[in-house]
Amino acid sequence: MKSIYTILGVLLLLAATACENFLDVNENPNNPQNAPITGLMTNATYETALNVQRIGSITSNYVQYLASPNPASASDVMEPLNYSGTWFNLYNAMTDLTDLISQAEESEAGHYLGAGQVLMALNLGMTVDIFGDVPYSEGFDFSAVTPVYDDDEQLYAEVLRLLDQGLQNLEGTTAISIGDDDFIFQGDVDKWIKFGNVLKARFMLHSPNVNANEVLSAIDNGFEGNDDDAYVEFFEQRFNPWAQVAINNENLLLGGWISTQFIEALDGTSYPAMDPRLALMVGTTDEGEFIGVPNGAGRGNAPEQGARSTLIPGQYYTSELSPLLIATYAEQKFIEAEAALVSDPNRAYAAYLAGIGAHMDMLEVPASEKEAYLSEPTVSMGAGALTRDDIMKEKWVALFLHPETWNDARRFDYGYKDMTLPANLNTDLNNQFIRRLPYPDNEVSRNGQNVPEVTLLDRIWWDE
């Protein structure tokens, strides 16, 4: 658990820290306000977790975890929206990390440097995954008010370079040790090293020319169990954002309604096995049933509250103090299963089952129910019968509300069983699923001469 001093520290930091950013054109870049390295670490770890959730709140409708209760809602039908806030938050985190990395180099604080590089790689990778080409080389030195956009494939090479450098620095010596200012691992450098390797495996897996052996090599140095998971816990002064969605929904500020696709994937409709995790992830109707909302169609003839399943307060993902998951052992096992499927089916099958088990353990599924699910013939089909479809389906369940699932969906060409296009789909998509986010309005108005012209069907480099 985080100490009270760390909790108070982040509250003070969030209230007082001013982040210089190339987006903040009203700030004087010649008069920066330097935060201490410990404060930068606190803010960077905290904001990175929030950035994962912020992106997940966008993509959860695309991968049909969530659905809008209102017909033809823009989030469901994949209309272009203004993501200026998401862009700003990603760049604010990377600006703080630029300062952290610089201070760590000057102070010979190798472990801070390594952790900063890992976090920079994660935030940059997430930014590229949703927007494609973005400013980076001119993004943080204030030399350009209208920075150029760097190629997304080259930025991915930078992501992997940062991870390699970060791991090297984490494995070396340091003049200053990380402590409770680290909201993710509370200064546990061994866990930072495992985390960096998991991220290497994640980003390498995105490549259309993935080297499975390199992915598996990173996995070998990754997490060893759920206790290694990367997450940030919340506290009484700031609830988990998904908890706030559930609370808001109870107060008729509607959000967090569950897609029919997700319900039917777990309730025995789309797949033979009834999944015991369903009741631990989403709520029932007032009648005790699991009923979803079809994406794009809205709640139809059931306008009243309680007639459809929603996120509800108090569950694993939606308790006020629930962790925000950044990377998990369960995700790692599914990465391993996919990477090993062709070359080592036995390893892939063992990893696939371990991924399901790890997620069930996270949710505290009773042992008897866990055993029953894993004994289902369509779940435990054997190494020779395991397919990529099986792996991707179980990974989709285990990464509930996480933005990495949208990367998987695009790599998988949205090939999940019974995942259909939403009703009232944006006509500009020509009966196809969305492939990228549009550039935010603020960036287009501020830096329009450099912003690439794209459509929602233009693909990120690894999705081409």
Image (cartoon, rainbow, N blue to C red):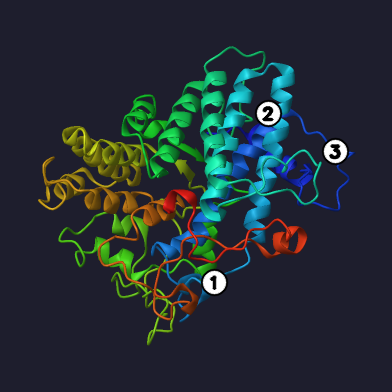
Disc 2 crowd rating (10 Å Cα; few below 14, some 14-19, many 20+) is: many
Give residue 225's position: percent from left, percent from top: 34, 31
Q: For this rendering, which residue is in front, 69 or 131? A: 131
Using the rendered view, name the quadrant where residue 159 is placed: top right
Give residue 268's position: percent from left, percent from top: 19, 64
Tag 2 secondary structure: helix
Residue 147 in sight: yes
Q: CA distance from mark 2 to mark 3?
A: 16 Å
Q: Which residue is mark 3?
A: 32
Q: Amino acid at mark 2?
A: Ile
Residue 8 in sight: no
Count of picture labels: 3
Q: Which mark is residue 251?
A: 1
Q: Earlier in the sequence, mark 3 or mark 1?
A: 3
Q: Which mark is residue 128?
A: none
Give residue 236's position: percent from left, percent from top: 59, 48
Q: Earlier in the sequence, mark 2 or mark 1?
A: 2
Disc 1 crowd rating (10 Å Cα; few below 14, some 14-19, many 20+) is: few
Q: CA distance from mark 3 to mark 1?
A: 42 Å
Task: Evaluate if marks 2 and 3 touch, with contact meaning CB atoms under 8 Å apart.
Answer: no
Give residue 117's position: percent from left, percent from top: 59, 30
Q: Amino acid at mark 3?
A: Pro
Q: Is residue 136 left or right of residue 454?
A: right
Tag 3 secondary structure: loop
Using the rendered view, name the quadrant where residue 343 is placed: top left
Q: Which residue is mark 2?
A: 101
Q: Hey, which residue is sitting farthest bottom in the picture?
A: 301
Disc 3 crowd rating (10 Å Cα; few below 14, some 14-19, many 20+) is: few
Q: Residue at x 36, y 29 (%)?
A: 214
Q: Amino acid at mark 1?
A: Asn
